[in-house]
Image (tube, rainbow, N blue to C red):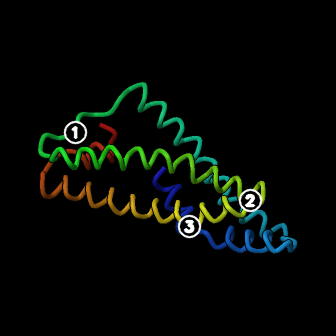
Amino acid sequence: MAALILFNLLFTDAMETAGRLMFRGQALTPEQVSAANIHAYVGISVLVLGLIRLCLRLVQGVPPEPRQEPPFLRAVVKISHWAFYALFVAMPLAGIGAWYFGNKTAAFAHTGPLKILMWALIVAHIGGALVHQFYWKTDVLKRMTSGR
């Protein structure tokens, strides 16, 4: 999922061009539609995988937090993880609303606040993993990368 999300966050030119033309009422070439559809299909994949992850989390639960983590940060971690799950659903749905239904509000939400929040959470997530690895010396990074 991380690779798919980063792909869509970094490679937006084709979809941005197609969206701009679409909202101006201009015709898109088949090549532009194909290139934009890659972004759309990756986003739909993120939505499906995000829902699967959410179901697994609800059924299987999550590993316990490390004892070294302060209680305040445990709350921050829970909020940020649930924010990720919300974005795994909201961002693709906003993209679907923009691309398939021509909704400008959805397009704004997708390319504006939701995208900024996703980047902020990614940076915080990486920072938190590094703090766990090098400051608290926990196994959180290993759990994140190996699933154990």
Query: Badge 1: few (under 14), some or many (20 or more) residues near its Cα, within 10 Å?
Result: few
Q: Secondary structure at mark 3?
A: loop
Residue 27 left/right relative to 18: right
Tell me the kind of residue under disc 2: Asn
Between discs 2 and 1, the one toward the N terminus = 1
Query: Badge 3: few (under 14), some or many (20 or more) residues near its Cα, within 10 Å?
Result: few
Are the residues flagged by discs 1 and 3 in contact, CB closer than 8 Å?
Answer: no
Q: Residue at x 61, y 69 (%)?
A: 12
Are the residues flagged by discs 2 and 1 in contact, CB closer than 8 Å?
Answer: no
Residue 90 left/right relative to 96: left
Q: Which residue is mark 1?
A: 65
Residue 47: x %, y % from top left: 58, 45
- 3D distance between C-alphas at marks 3 and 2: 14 Å
**Camera-nearest label, 1 or 3:** 3
Q: Residue at x 44, y 49 (%)?
A: 84
Q: Secondary structure at mark 1?
A: loop
Q: Which residue is mark 3?
A: 112
| Res 35 → quadrant | bottom right
